[in-house]
Amino acid sequence: MAENNLNIKMNAENMDLFYGNFKALEGINMPIYEKQVTALIGPSGSGKSTFIKSLNRMNDLVEGCKVTGQITLDGKNIYDRDVNLNLLRKNVGMVFQQPNPFPMSIYDNIAYGPRTHGIKDKNELDEIVETSLRGAAIWDEVKDNLNKSGMSISGGQQQRVCIARALAVKPDVLLMDEPTSALDPISTLKVEELVQQLRDDYTIVIVTHNMQQAARVSDYTGFFYADPETGPGKSHIIEFGETDQIFNNPTNSQTADYVAGRFG
């Protein structure tokens, strides 16, 4: 248990990430608390997306990527050799910056993951699809058009369908890499409201460039920064803490300058 009586669901400890000889992340130490929303903020190029993709090993797809130190999920290092990547990515789902529905029906988008994990029963799939779409607050909008292409609906609806698709395999952790940056303000608000609802059942990590969004939706915030004077790369965490403290009483002057909009 953590000092604040919250369980640590995932934990980065002395983590470095390399692309070949290039060190992109250096000395990352950060807890991710269970059933809390953790926001990652920082200027472009500060390593936020690189870090979030390391939490379900999406960076494995990048040639030459190597992680040292460790990242644990429920106490087990996800970079151990015996880790089942399919199971890891089922437990740690991801929603990307651009909505990316599959070129198939809304129903099949949601049923895709459960089917790959062996669920074939039509009644069970029907229930999962409805539950997931309800969980993503879009059931009422699409329930009469489940056979419609997932690519034929609005961008905001597509993003919520992608969130439903992630929920369908019952993850423990939901990663969201700038999930509203391609959306209009109304769709952005709907996704933010959805994040608030999902926090009761999921551990959520969200990368955002929007300071107000981080302040609105998150319980904890990590500020990532790479000092341009030391050359490219070597991003690290300047400060991590409760969101109210980071925004209203930061301990680091760089954090204070960033959240006040003086750079970035």
Image (tube, rainbow, N blue to C red):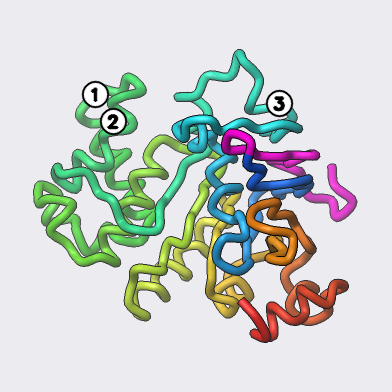
Residue in the foreground of this view, choosing between 12 and 119: 12
Q: Residue furthest top?
A: 82
Residue 8 part of the magenta-drawn span: yes
Residue at (25% x, 65% y) in the render: 155
| Residue 37 in sight in this render | no
Where residue 95 sits: x, y (%)? 42, 50
Q: Secondary structure at mark 3?
A: strand
Q: Which residue is mark 3?
A: 76
**First to last magenta residue range:** 1-21
The Cα atoms of the two marked residues, 3 and 1, are separated by 33 Å
Where residue 11 sits: x, y (%)? 73, 41
Residue 176 located left or right of residue 256: left
Where residue 18 sits: x, y (%)? 63, 38
Residue at (72% x, 64% y) in the render: 227
Kind of residue at disc 3: Lys
Residue in the foreground of this view, choosing between 178 and 225: 225
Q: Which residue is mark 2?
A: 124
Label 3 CA crowd tier, 10 Å (few <14, some 14–19, many 20+): few
Tell me which corner region of the image, top left, top right, bottom left or bottom right, holds residue 194: bottom left
Where residue 65 sits: x, y (%)? 56, 33
Q: Above or below — where is 93 with respect to 120?
A: below
Q: Above or below — where is 220 with respect to 256?
A: above
Label 2 CA crowd tier, 10 Å (few <14, some 14–19, many 20+): few
Q: Which residue is mark 1?
A: 121
Residue 169 located left or right of residue 123: right
Kind of residue at disc 1: Asp
Tell me which corner region of the image, top left, top right, bottom left or bottom right, holds residue 142: bottom left
Q: Above or below — where is 206 with respect to 42?
A: above
The Cα atoms of the two marked residues, 1 and 2, are separated by 5 Å
Residue in the foreground of this view, choosing between 33 and 222: 222
Quadrant into which the N terminus falls? top right
Q: Secondary structure at mark 1?
A: loop
